[in-house]
């Protein structure tokens, strides 16, 4: 059986900034209500231009599930690890809350969840895979995110990346994210 | 080692794996969430307590299909129902946050009887039996005292259970039912119906050119339009968006025109002018289906783009561009009808103009144009017989004697085309909120001293909060039915807790549109508190009413018997499941499909051209598409939309404009913690230049003052709004301490909005208020 | 064995040590109360560290204590292993001080880390050898053991000649492991992909140098306090040597500062630039100019230079001032690197920034835990002074 290689492809131009994904994520994953406790976010980018010639874009994002994983390399207890499919997860039982991963993450994707007494972050809804899509992907009105297997050339993510130019966030830190933004 | 890790992972992350046989048995819709059977022993164990139950969302008016993931009798998550194609299988922020509604700590948990003064917040918990008895007795008392059943008003807003609230008002016999449409879309319904005989939809999946005037679809969610406009845009569609405010829709649009508020009619008339003068209209369509085109040609000559430029501050060449593009792509051009159109006193004329634009370009009942709604008719209880009572007066907002000229700003627009003795076309069930309240306060022509309120929150919903409170103060009895202590409930005498939409059976609703579909609700969890559905509440009150003879002394005894036999026993005293079964009875298999899939539909393809068939008669006086409305002419209204300039704010003033966004519904959801954290407090948008002049910095607190009230609110200094207006979101600055997250947080809209009325449709005119702002 | 009375008579007297023991106890009580709060309410409720700045005061005070400890071990090692006579005269005090202040440091990290016991368990069960924190644990753990062995040797009755050799070897390892531990602490930060301010070899060197300087400063300060600023003649040469070491250390620090700041300024608009700007003109500027530069560099260096490192009182004052200033040095080092946000603080981003920088100010509880660290140090150290003889007889 060929190994899967999970990725999320985002078309941020579709994003309406409706926050369906952020609320869905909190409920699906029992993320506590609070301004520091969130796994995913939608940033309202700065407005360009002057009235009445304005432009504004939105950028939804979350843990980038980096192939080169700065958070895992600084974790003293291997609580942060990567699955075969490339999903970066935290084993709550091993997390010692030293927060090195939080300072190491170039995307500010991690936070302390008091309820599980560990650092946590997006899991690509690993508990839903492979039968159901991540909650943010499923609930999105305009389907900004597409989830799938990069090792399957017929998957939608593979096709999207083959067809469209794309970028990844902060290429300078060489993390090789599994989140791809198509133009 | 690998295996070990994987198992550990699964144990921790698979708090629930969906894939179980039992879940499939419980919910046929399960296959729809793309789950496949798994032989993982561990996930089987989890699945034992996991259910997936289809139902429908109740967080806004869209009623999207959902599939509730319930674990050990508790809702874990609400997911979109992929079979619910009207929403294109999505669930928005509110839909997701709905999972918290049943567990909200501020929920009403038991019937409450007021103890201290109104609004003091002293309550006594009483039993349902006592509550029903009290409500029935009060109804009897008011009827005896005023010898008029219409002295009790029944106030409600849309929802699956509203049907049963209406049964309560019909059982009692009051004509004074007041509903939400005149705070919302009465004018757009009237405007489009006056041309096409119906309020249609827009086919955004196939449109090539879309003109949206103030309909902020990216934020104000309407299914499927919110999704369709975005999906169609990257491919081919051009979106022109007109709004004084740079909304998320503006951010998506190809063109955004920051129009001067109140002048949209000038803009549309100028577009019509260009299309006619350049011969870009659809002559065949006009000749075949419409009435009065020649009158229009003469009428719009005066409305040149150059003239309109001065009115709406959109350059004439841009107006010409829009007109030519619109005509070029017609009939795949949409002038979007919109939803909440309670903007200006002459709003109906603006909506008429939009409909006329669609008519002359032939963008009607065709792919990519404006398309009349289809629906799936449900079986009704035709045999239901209510008594005919003697002690009933006609609606107060229709029969009032005095003029309501004070409800229309005294400017050019008041000079003609707007009646001020009575609203021209009131829906007899909806009434007109603004006129109704004004009439009650004057007891003109009779006193209204009782109020039953279901789900609506007039204190925050109706402009001029003080006036609403004044009206409530003169009531002798107010009973409110809601799930949380709304501001209206806070000032009530009897508060009855309803079960949330996730805890009850709700009858089917046929959602009409280009893609009609039927939804219903089944409870996904048992009621958590001692709450009941509106249906059970109506049944409880009516059963108590039947025990009071004085309530039935103004009708025939046989009427009462027929009422018992056709309404009380077969409907009210039966479970809602029976009601659903009856509604779907014309369609074999529909009931089973509804329970299993959460939806029922006949076809998922759009149908076009029904109104173009030979012999089709439009619901207008001439039976044609009325560019020139004959009935308006008869009734002394403008048969063609006449532009009149609205008043504009003084240099030190701002116009208040309203708008919705995707994080809250009206004033009903702000107290949900998942939504509250998206917007913990509202802030007023002020143009950066005006803010600078006033010395207001982003984040400063300011006072907003109108002729009816003052509110304190945080300033959001932005370039996203015109200098002559301000905007802030609805639902903050609340009066009820029962809404702990938003009680006195931010500013209320109702508190500063002045009450004006569009007297053609009865719609409130909420964009007519001017305010002054000063730093707090 | 010498009696307690005699040992006390050598020093300024029982009153002073007893007073410090009482002060230590008070600080311990404050810290104990705070620890209870942390246990009952949880870290999130009582600490001000946040999502953007996860490491705060307690990491700074941890670094403050443990790096000073390794600096002391370094100086002790010079005395023991390399026969620097002047330092070996103080070797007992050095070892006790290094041991006790290391324990103080451990209280800080113990209260900072959410699951300290779990850390110890999983460091054995599933250590990530790539993670610098593992090596931090290893090195500081070994350092504690080495210092314990040194303590044993020093206080062992009836010492033999072989004990002196053992002491030499152990002293050498204390120095070596101490330097490893502290430079590795620099690497704990240097390995943070996201934080360019910490990247490179700079902090590894800076921490070692400032640590040795701190060791010298603390010895100067404590000796002056113990002898009520009247240090006995026989220790003068040692004190002078420490003064010179401290002066030299500050001298090196000046160069390190200079090039770090200049090179960071040239990375504009990178995060390293932002961090340095936060120090120079931003929210940390008072800390930096007054705390780090005036107290930990300019004043002590000036005192040492103008007193030619030969006025005992002046050296003591320089030591005290330096130790105060060094706190800001450690605090700024921890906080500055985390102030540049990983994402812009725009609406919806969830990131909280003011003027483009993340925000952090320690909570009362964090300060109280800092008091716990001082309590451990002061209480245990002066207990040792009170009941043990820490004056070292000539080898």
Image (spheres, rainbow, N blue to C red):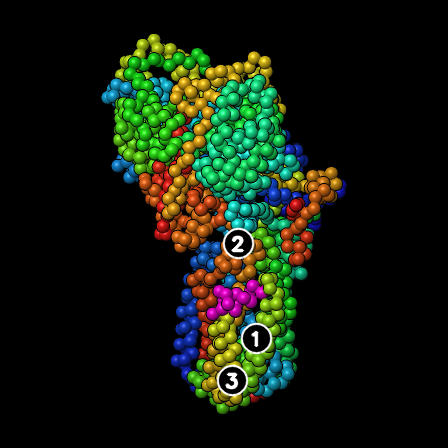
Spatial separation of the CA atoms under disc 2 and disc 1: 35 Å
Residue B430: tell me if it is visible. no
Q: Residue at x 60, y 54 (%)?
A: A107
- Are labels 2 and 3 assigned to the same chain? yes
- Residue at (56%, 46%) from the top-left corner? A55
Say if labels 2 and 1 share a chain. Answer: yes
Q: Which residue is mark 3?
A: C304
Q: CA distance from mark 1 to mark 3?
A: 16 Å
Q: Residue B467's x, y, as percent?
A: 31, 35
Pointer 2 residue: C345
Where disc 3 sits, the SS reads helix
Q: Which residues are magenta?
A: C272-286
Q: Secondary structure at mark 1?
A: helix
Residue B525: horizontal and vertical position, in percent? 49, 32
Q: Which residue is mark 1?
A: C210
Residue at 32% across, 19% down: B394
**Residues marked 1 and 3 touching at CB (< 8 Å):** no
Count neighbours of disc 3 (C-alpha within 10 A) and say few if under 14, some if 14 to 19, many if 20 or more: many
Q: Residues within 10 Å of mark 2 (few under 14, many from 20)?
A: many
Residue B139 in percent (x, y) is at: 30, 22
Left or right: B710 as drawn, with respect to C90: left
Judge whether residue B118 can be spotted in this image: yes
Mark 1, other Cα within 10 Å: few <14 / some 14–19 / many ≥20 = many
């Amino acid at each position: 059986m060929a190994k899967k290689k999970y990725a999320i492809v985002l078309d941020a131009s579709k994003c309406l900034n409706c926050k369906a994904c952020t609320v869905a994520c909190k409920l699906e994953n029992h993320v506590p209500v609070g301004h520091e406790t969130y796994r995913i976010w939608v940033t309202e980018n700065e407005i360009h231009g002057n009235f009445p010639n304005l432009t504004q874009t939105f950028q939804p994002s979350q843990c980038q599930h980096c192939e080169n994983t700065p958070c895992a390399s600084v974790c003293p207890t291997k609580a942060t690890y990567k699955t075969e499919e490339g999903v970066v997860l935290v084993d709550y039982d091993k997390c010692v809350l030293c927060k090195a991963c939080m300072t190491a993450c170039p995307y500010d994707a991690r936070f302390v969840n008091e309820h599980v007494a560990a650092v946590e972050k997006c899991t690509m809804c690993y508990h839903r895979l492979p039968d159901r899509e991540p909650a943010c992907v499923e609930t999105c009105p305009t389907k900004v995110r597409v989830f799938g297997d990069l090792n399957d050339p017929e998957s939608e993510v593979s096709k999207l990346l083959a067809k469209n130019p794309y970028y990844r966030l902060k290429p300078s830190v060489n993390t090789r994210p599994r989140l791809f933004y198509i133009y | 080692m690998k295996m070990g890790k994987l198992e550990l992972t699964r144990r921790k992350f698979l708090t629930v794996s969906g894939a179980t046989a039992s879940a499939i048995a419980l919910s046929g819709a399960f296959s729809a969430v793309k789950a496949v059977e798994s032989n993982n022993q561990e996930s089987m164990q989890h699945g034992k307590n996991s259910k997936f139950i289809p139902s429908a969302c109740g967080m806004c008016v869209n009623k999207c299909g959902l599939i509730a993931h319930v674990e050990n009798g508790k809702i874990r998550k609400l997911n979109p129902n992929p079979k619910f194609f009207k929403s294109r299988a999505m669930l928005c922020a509110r839909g997701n946050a709905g999972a918290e509604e049943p567990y909200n700590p501020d929920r009403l948990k038991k019937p409450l009887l007021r103890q201290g003064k109104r609004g003091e917040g002293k309550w006594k918990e009483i039993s349902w039996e006592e509550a029903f008895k009290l409500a029935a007795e009060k109804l009897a008392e008011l009827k005896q005292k005023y010898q008029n059943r219409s002295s009790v008003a029944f106030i409600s807003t849309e929802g699956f259970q509203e049907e049963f609230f209406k049964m309560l008002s019909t059982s009692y016999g009051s004509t004074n039912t007041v509903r939400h449409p005149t705070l919302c879309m009465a004018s757009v319904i009237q405007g489009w119906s006056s041309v096409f005989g119906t309020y249609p939809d827009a086919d955004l999946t196939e449109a090539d050119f879309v003109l949206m005037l103030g309909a902020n679809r990216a934020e104000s969610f309407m299914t499927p339009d919110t999704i369709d406009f975005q999906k169609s845009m990257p491919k081919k569609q051009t979106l022109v968006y007109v709004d004084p405010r740079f909304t998320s829709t503006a951010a998506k649009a190809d063109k955004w025109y920051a129009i001067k508020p109140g002048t949209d009619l000038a803009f549309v008339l100028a577009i019509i002018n260009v299309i006619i003068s350049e011969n870009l209209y659809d002559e065949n369509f006009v000749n075949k289906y419409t009435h009065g085109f020649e009158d229009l040609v003469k009428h719009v000559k005066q409305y040149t783009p150059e003239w309109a430029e001065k009115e709406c501050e959109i350059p004439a060449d841009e107006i010409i561009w829009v007109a030519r593009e619109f005509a070029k792509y017609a009939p795949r051009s949409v002038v979007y009808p919109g939803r909440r159109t309670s903007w200006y006193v002459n709003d109906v004329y603006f909506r008429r103009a939009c409909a006329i634009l669609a008519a002359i370009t032939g963008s009607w009942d065709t792919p990519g144009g404006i398309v009349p709604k289809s629906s799936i008719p449900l079986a009704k209880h035709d045999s239901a017989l209510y008594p005919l009572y003697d002690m009933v007066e006609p609606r107060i907002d229709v029969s009032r004697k005095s003029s309501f000229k004070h409800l229309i700003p005294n400017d050019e627009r008041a000079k003609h085309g707007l009646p001020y003795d009575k609203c021209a076309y009131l829906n007899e069930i909806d009434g007109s909120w603004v006129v109704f309240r004004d009439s009650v306060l004057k007891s003109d022509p009779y006193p209204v001293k009782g109020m039953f309120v279901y789900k609506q929150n007039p204190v925050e919903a109706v402009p001029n909060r003080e006036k609403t409170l004044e009206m409530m103060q003169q009531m002798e009895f107010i009973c409110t039915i809601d799930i949380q202590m709304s501001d209206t409930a806070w000032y009530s005498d009897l508060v009855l807790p309803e079960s949330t939409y996730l805890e009850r059976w709700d009858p089917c609703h046929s959602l009409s549109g280009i893609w009609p579909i039927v939804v219903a609700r089944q409870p996904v969890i048992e009621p958590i508190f001692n709450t009941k559905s509106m249906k059970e509440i109506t049944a409880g009150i009516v059963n108590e009413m039947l025990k009071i003879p004085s309530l039935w002394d103004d009708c025939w005894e046989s009427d009462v018997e027929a009422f018992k036999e056709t309404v009380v026993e077969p409907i009210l005293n039966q479970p809602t499941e029976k009601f659903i079964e009856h509604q779907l009875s014309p369609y074999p298999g529909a009931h089973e499909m509804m329970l299993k899939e959460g939806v029922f539909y006949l076809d998922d393809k759009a149908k076009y051209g029904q109104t173009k068939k030979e012999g089709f008669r439009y619901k207008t006086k001439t039976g044609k598409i009325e560019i020139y409305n004959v009935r308006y002419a008869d009734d002394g209204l403008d048969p063609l939309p006449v532009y009149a300039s609205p008043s504009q704010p003084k240099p030190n003033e701002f116009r208040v404009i309203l708008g919705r966004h995707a994080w809250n519904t009206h004033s009903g959801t702000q107290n949900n913690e998942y939504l509250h954290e998206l917007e913990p407090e509202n802030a007023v948008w002020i143009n950066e230049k005006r803010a600078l002049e006033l010395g207001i910095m982003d984040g400063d607190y300011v006072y907003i003052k109108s002729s009816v009230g003052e509110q304190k609110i945080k300033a959001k200094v932005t370039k996203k709004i015109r200098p002559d207006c301000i905007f802030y979101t609805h639902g903050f600055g609340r009066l009820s301490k029962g809404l702990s997250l938003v009680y006195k947080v931010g500013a209320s809209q109702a508190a500063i909005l002045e009450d004006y009325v569009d007297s053609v449709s009865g719609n409130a005119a909420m964009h007519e208020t001017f305010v002054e702002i000063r730093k707090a | 064995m010498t009696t307690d009375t005699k040992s006390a008579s050598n020093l300024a007297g029982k009153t002073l040590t007893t007073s410090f023991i009482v002060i230590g106890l008070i600080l311990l009580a404050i810290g104990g109360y705070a620890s209870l709060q942390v246990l009952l309410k949880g870290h999130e409720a009582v600490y001000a560290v946040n999502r953007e700045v996860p490491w705060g005061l307690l990491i700074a005070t941890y670094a403050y204590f443990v790096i000073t400890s390794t600096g002391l071990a370094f100086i002790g090692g010079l005395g023991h292993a390399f026969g620097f006579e002047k330092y070996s005269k103080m070797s007992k005090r050095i070892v006790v001080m290094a041991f006790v202040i290391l324990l103080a440091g451990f209280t800080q990290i113990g209260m900072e880390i959410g699951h300290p016991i779990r850390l110890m368990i999983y460091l054995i069960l599933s250590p990530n050898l790539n993670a610098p924190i593992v090596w931090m644990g290893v090195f500081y753990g070994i350092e504690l053991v080495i210092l314990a062995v040194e303590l044993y040797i020093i206080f062992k009755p009836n010492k033999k000649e072989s004990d002196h050799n053992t002491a030499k070897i152990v002293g050498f390892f204390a120095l070596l492991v101490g330097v490893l531990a502290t430079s590795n602490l620099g690497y704990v930060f240097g390995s943070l992909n996201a934080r360019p301010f910490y990247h490179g070899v700079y902090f590894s060197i800076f921490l070692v140098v400032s640590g040795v300087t701190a060791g010298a400063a603390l010895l100067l300060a404590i000796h002056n306090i113990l002898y009520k600023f009247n240090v006995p003649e026989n220790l003068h040469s040692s004190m002078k040597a420490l003064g010179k070491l401290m002066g030299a250390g500050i001298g090196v620090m000046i160069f390190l500062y200079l090039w770090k700041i200049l090179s960071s300024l040239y990375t504009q608009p990178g995060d390293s630039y932002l961090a340095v700007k936060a120090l120079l003109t931003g929210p940390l500027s008072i800390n930096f100019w007054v705390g780090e530069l005036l107290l930990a560099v300019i004043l002590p260096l000036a005192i040492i230079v103008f007193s030619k490192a030969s006025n005992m009182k002046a050296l003591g004052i320089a030591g005290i001032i330096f130790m105060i200033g060094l706190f800001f040095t450690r605090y700024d080092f921890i906080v500055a690197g985390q102030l540049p946000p990983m994402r812009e603080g725009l609406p919806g981003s969830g990131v909280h920034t003011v003027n483009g920088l993340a925000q952090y100010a320690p909570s009362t509880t964090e300060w109280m835990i800092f008091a716990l660290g001082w309590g451990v140090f002061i209480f245990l150290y002066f207990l040792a002074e009170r009941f043990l003889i820490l004056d070292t007889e000539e080898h």
